[in-house]
Image (cartoon, rainbow, N blue to C red):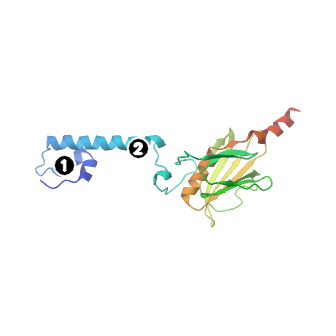
């Protein structure tokens, strides 16, 4: 009988039985052992994926190879809340704020992210090749998100169009795709600050 490796066992009972039998007959004991090992492997894999909703996250050591603006592979446990008069969101530890005029900006290990009043003409003003885009909602407001690759790094742009307040433009830049995924997550789960819409809502009521 040939020497059978555990790799064959992991591929399933049928492959293991076929690869380990010299006469073409299936050994019942080996088949049972292979089936038990395969089932155990399946359960262990399912348990490992369950906390992340079926996706392996970058923080667990799985480097992201590609990224979609409509997909979120990031585990944000342990992130910190930040806020401005326009936007509220969570960022990885280590980000510091540095607002200039009406622009709120945070810089940290993953890169930088900034929110400012905007218009469609100023959207994506840093340029770059668009690699993915998606239409989502932030605080109920329609938002268009783009992922771009530029000479500076990997960017994320978002254009938020609230119904009762001026538009908000968010620009973010990371050094690599893992940082880009983190900044994309921060934008996708952001919320519009109540301080941003309130003055305009009051004007409409007068």
Q: Position of residue 21 (x, y in %)?
A: 14, 50
- Find the distance from the CA under tag 2 to the CA under tag 1: 29 Å
Q: Nearer the viewer, residue 99 or 184?
A: 99
Q: In this view, does 73 lie to the left or right of 100?
A: left
Q: Residue at x 35, y 43 (%)?
A: 44
Picture disc at residue 48: 2
**Above or below, 138 relative to 67:** above
Q: In this view, does 100 lie to the left or right of 34?
A: right
Residue 103: percent from the left, percent from the top?
A: 76, 53
x, y percentage for residue 128? 64, 62
Give the crowd class for mark 1: few <14, some 14-19, many >=20 residues within 10 Å. Answer: some
Determine the residue positioned at 51% across, 56% down.
66
Dot 2: few (<14), some (14–19), or many (≥20) neighbours within 10 Å? some
Q: Which mark is residue 99?
A: none
Query: Which residue is painted at 24% across and 48% down in the image?
Result: 9
Residue on which disc 1 sits: 18
The residue sitting at 46% across, 51% down in the picture is 60
Q: Residue at the bottom extreme? A: 151
**Sequence-first tag of 2 and 1:** 1
- Residue toward you, 141 or 59: 59
Q: What element carries label 2?
A: helix
Q: Residue 2 versus residue 57: which sits nearer the camera?
A: 57
The quadrant of the rendering that contains the C terminus is top right
Q: Quadrant of residue 50?
A: top left
């Amino acid at each position: 009988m040939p020497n059978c490796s555990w790799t064959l066992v992991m591929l399933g009972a049928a492959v293991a039985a076929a690869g380990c039998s010299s006469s073409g007959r299936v050994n019942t004991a080996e088949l049972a052992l292979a089936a038990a090992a395969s089932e155990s492997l399946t359960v262990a894999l399912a348990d490992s994926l369950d906390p992340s909703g079926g996706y392996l996250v970058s923080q667990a050591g799985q480097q992201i190879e590609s990224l979609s603006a409509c997909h979120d592979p990031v585990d944000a446990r342990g992130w910190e809340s930040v806020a401005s008069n326009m936007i509220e969101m969570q960022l990885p530890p280590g980000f510091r704020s540095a607002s200039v005029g009406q622009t709120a900006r945070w810089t940290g290990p993953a890169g930088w992210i900034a929110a400012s009043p905007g218009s469609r003409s100023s959207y994506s003003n840093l340029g770059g090749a668009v690699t993915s885009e998606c239409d989502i909602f932030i605080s109920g407001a329609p938002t268009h998100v783009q992922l771009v690759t530029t000479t500076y790094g990997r960017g994320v742009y978002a254009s938020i169009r609230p119904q009762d307040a001026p538009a908000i433009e968010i620009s973010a830049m990371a050094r690599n795709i893992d940082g880009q995924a983190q900044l994309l997550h921060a934008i996708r789960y952001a919320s519009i600050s109540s301080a941003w819409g309130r003055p305009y809502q009051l004007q409409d009521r007068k």
